[in-house]
Image (spheres, rainbow, N blue to C red):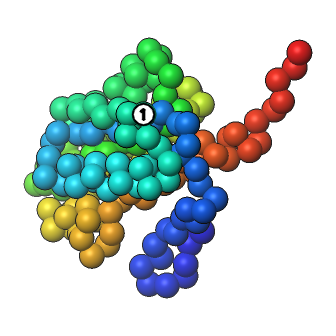
Amino acid sequence: MSRPDAESKTEFESSRISGKGLRVALVVSRFNNSITRNLARGARAALLRNGVRARDILEVDVPGAWELPLAIRTLAERGHIDAFVALGCVIRGETDHYKYVAGEASRGLSDVSLALGVPVGFGLLTTDTARQAAERAGGKHGNKGEDAAMAALEMVNLARRFARPKRR
């Protein structure tokens, strides 16, 4: 649900979102590590607050944002994970490299979620400056890792709510 205020931050109704019994993987880019570690802390805290047991949170590091989609696909194909949270940070530089990495990583995350039918919380920051990234990784704009984790949980809950009954 979004508010029409200037910030238009997303709010989650935690009372309606449950992580009980879920296995969630945090897939975290090491590139811009000081930012992504804060995103991971926020995501983990949100999962724990909403009933996911610590032992049911798998955290996997990858080199950068580009590798997030393949890592998620690999994990999804090898084990039972109910949802993923992709955490990364791409900061605009002096070349076009930023737009290719940010755009293709984003598209890859969408593609893998749709292909596998598994929620992927989108915690990939794409900012102009390191300061903007820090503000979104626990600073004045909140923690987008937490938001991504909550979105992933909400989507698992939604899928379960509307799942077709199994035929005998």
Q: Position of residue 56 (x, y in %)?
A: 42, 34
Q: Inspect this view and state whether residue 109 appears.
A: no
Q: Position of residue 101 (x, y in %)?
A: 27, 41
Residue under the point 64% across and 46% down: 157
Residue under the point 27% across and 39% down: 28
* Secondary structure beneath label 1: helix
Q: Position of residue 152 (x, y in %)?
A: 51, 46
Q: Inspect this view and state whether residue 82 appears.
A: yes
Residue 168: quadrant of the picture? top right
Residue under the point 74% across and 44% down: 161
Q: Nearer the viewer, residue 2 or 41?
A: 41
Residue 55: quadrant of the picture? top left
| Residue 95 as seen in the image, left or right of residue 12 | left
Q: Nearer the viewer, residue 54 or 14?
A: 54
Residue under the point 27% across and 76% down: 140
Q: Which residue is mark 1?
A: 56
- Badge 1 amino acid: Asp
Viewport quadrant of the N terminus = bottom right
| Residue 117 as seen in the image, left or right of residue 61 | right
